[in-house]
Amino acid sequence: KTGARQNQSYKARRAPGRRRSKTKPAAMGTHTSEAEKEMREWCVALPKVELHAHLNGSVRNSTLLELAKELGDKGVIVFEDVKGVIMKNDRSLPECVRLFDLFHTLTTDHDTVTRIAKEVVGDFAAENVVYLEIRTTPKNNEAKGITKRSYMNAVVKGLKSVEDVDVVINDEKLSCTPMSVLGGDTKRKKIYVRLLLSIDRHETTSAALDTVNLAMEMKDQGVIGIDLSGNPVVGEWETYLPALEHAKELGIPTTIHCGEVPNRKEIQAMLDFCPQRLGHVCCLDDEEWKKLKSSVIPVEICLTSNVMTGGTPSLELHHFADLYNTKHPLSICTDDSGLFSTSLSNEYYLAASTFGLSKTELFRLAQGAVEFVFADDEVKKSLRAVFERAAAERLTS
Ligand SMILES: [Zn+2]
């Protein structure tokens, strides 16, 4: 049923007048034509807003390899077993799952968490992401002396230790740092970073409540929202609901991984909860789809991730087309750029090459995402100015 709906919308998208690139959407590194190269560069230069990125899934391959080697030397893992998967660019789903387990083995000390946070911010800034919301699950690990709070402190330390980019994580710094001019005479990039604390679907109600309370405590350190994520076939909605309701009472915005697998009751409940944003929305039936659209809840679209994890049968059949055509609020996101060997620029490129979006349409898409950030109006104002300036510079040149 879902497939039929998507198919129909895709045809609509390819109405006469729509030109579609003959180049098969492909991962980076394959043979590229001049036009593709130019478009890819344009997507990198485009200022972008990233709203759905998991910290652990966004680790660079080179760092992953180095950390795995260290763990191998310590005898925690067998390095040769994971080396091949790390070096591979086009991973199968079982390989992704294996890597995901590895991420969790790797992030069990504060220094590694700090390093990863620092590098992830640097990588996003390098591809001209001007606003980034990173989500991560604060974990207690008694054996390693890690608490949810100390884990998050390590993340914040990472954000603060980025050297070659101006990282703005709270309003205090906002008022004293002048806005760098994108494409102007300064080479130094500036990125707003905010943190979302994830409730993992394996957690109990009380652990989920702890996470929400921690988010409240860390409000002045860039923590801005709550996410619900994790293995979509694990756990019950009722377990997390008290924590999500608590967040709502405290005025903390929420985003929810929704419909990664078909689960009628849960999808209904998630839509009824009315979070500020929803991630994925892959497996909605017609009824739920209608409800989503009338709700106008912004959707975080993760093209590569949805294809690789089987949430959608192919890029061409992705529900992006339907949402885009009906002007549903949405933003393009990576989910796990390291894990899925992608980048936000690549996701924009895929949207263009698969659905025939023009540069102007891509620009509007990136600009539109500003309205769905969890940061306050001051930040939104600054971001709007970034895009207006970029529009004046880029669209006229
Ligand atoms: Zn996700």
Image (cartoon, rainbow, N blue to C red):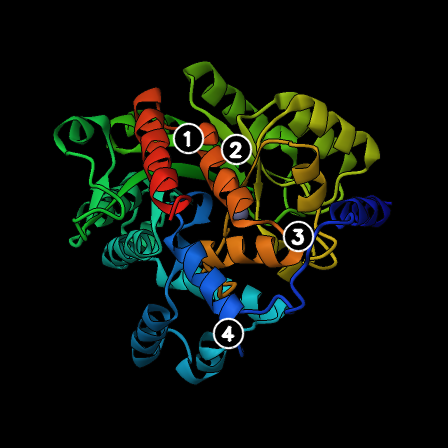
Q: Mark 4 is on which residue type?
A: Asn
Residue 198 in percent (x, y) is at 46, 39
Q: Is residue 384 visible?
A: yes
Residue, x 21% and y 46% (percent of image)?
Answer: 184
Report which residue position mark 3 lands on: 355
**Label 1 element class:** strand
Report which residue position mark 2 lands on: 255
Q: Of discs 2 and 3, which sits in the foreground?
A: 3
Residue 221 in percent (x, y) is at 25, 32
Residue 23 in percent (x, y) is at 63, 69
Task: Determine the image quadrant of residue 179.
Answer: top left
- In primary-sequence order, the first of circles 4 and 1 is 4
Residues at marks 2 and 3, CA–CA distance in whole angstroms: 26 Å
- In primary-sequence order, the first of circles 2 and 1 is 1
Q: Mark 3 is on which residue type?
A: Phe
Question: CB under 8 Å between callouts 2 and 1?
Answer: yes
Report which residue position mark 4 lands on: 89
**Label 4 element class:** loop
Question: CB under 8 Å between callouts 4 and 3?
Answer: no
Question: CB under 8 Å between callouts 4 and 1?
Answer: no
Residue sitting nearer the eye, 241 or 362? 362
Give the vertical position of 288 relative to 337 (above or below).
Answer: above
Q: Can you tell me whether the CB of the residue at mark 2 lies under 8 Å from the nearest atom of ligand 1? A: no
- In primary-sequence order, the first of circles 2 and 4 is 4
Residues at marks 1 and 3, CA–CA distance in whole angstroms: 31 Å
The residue positioned farthest toward the top in the image shown: 249
Residues at marks 2 and 4, CA–CA distance in whole angstroms: 29 Å
Residue sitting nearer the eye, 107 or 9? 9
The residue positioned farthest toward the front in the image shown: 396
